[in-house]
Image (cartoon, rainbow, N blue to C red):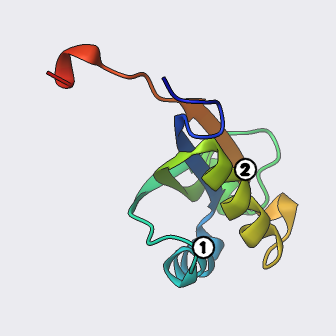
Amino acid sequence: MQTQATHLCLMRLRFAEAFYDTFTDLLLAYTEKSLDFVALPINRHHSQLQTMNEQVSGYQVGFEIQLKLSLAEVEALDQFLLAAVSRNSYELLVSPLMELSWRDA
């Protein structure tokens, strides 16, 4: 059985399209662990759209990066990111991953 700190989680970072290169560069430069991640384009729907194009289309183009890490690694990576970018530049979501007993056989 895993402790909370070692339990695997899905870490999701959501941010504006303008930050795509910044976040991918930071994750690739992370030296504590070689990170394997997926970057997905997303449409962010919210009431505070900034440009006229966003207001007409009803969404803001953004990205979501997904990583599978332990909870302790999530915390360390978040601290690494916060040393380089503002907390307001991204949204952090963390979900626990279930262990599938039938896959261990």
The residue drawn where x is 74% and y is 63% is 51
The residue drawn where x is 19% and y is 23% is 103
* Label 1 crowd (10 A; few <14 / some 14-19 / many >=20): many
Q: Is mark 1 on a helix, strand or loop?
A: helix
Q: Which residue is situated farthest in the left direction here?
A: 105
Q: In the shown orientation, is residue 5 left or right of residue 101?
A: right
Determine if residue 5 is in view: yes
The residue drawn where x is 45% and y is 67% is 35
Q: In which quarter of the image is residue 50?
A: bottom right
Q: Which mark is residue 23?
A: 1
* Label 2 crowd (10 A; few <14 / some 14-19 / many >=20): few
Q: Which amino acid does label 2 sit on?
A: Glu
Q: What element carries label 2?
A: strand
Q: Which mark is residue 91?
A: 2
Total marks shown come to: 2
Question: Residue 17 location in percent, x, y?
Answer: 59, 68
Question: Residue 75 location in percent, x, y?
Answer: 72, 52
**Quadrant placement of the C terminus:** top left
Q: In the shown orientation, is residue 67 left or right of residue 74?
A: left
Dot 2 or dot 1, earlier in sequence: 1
Question: Residue 42 location in percent, x, y?
Answer: 49, 50
Picture layout, residue 87 above or below residue 5: below
Picture layout, residue 31 above or below residue 56: below
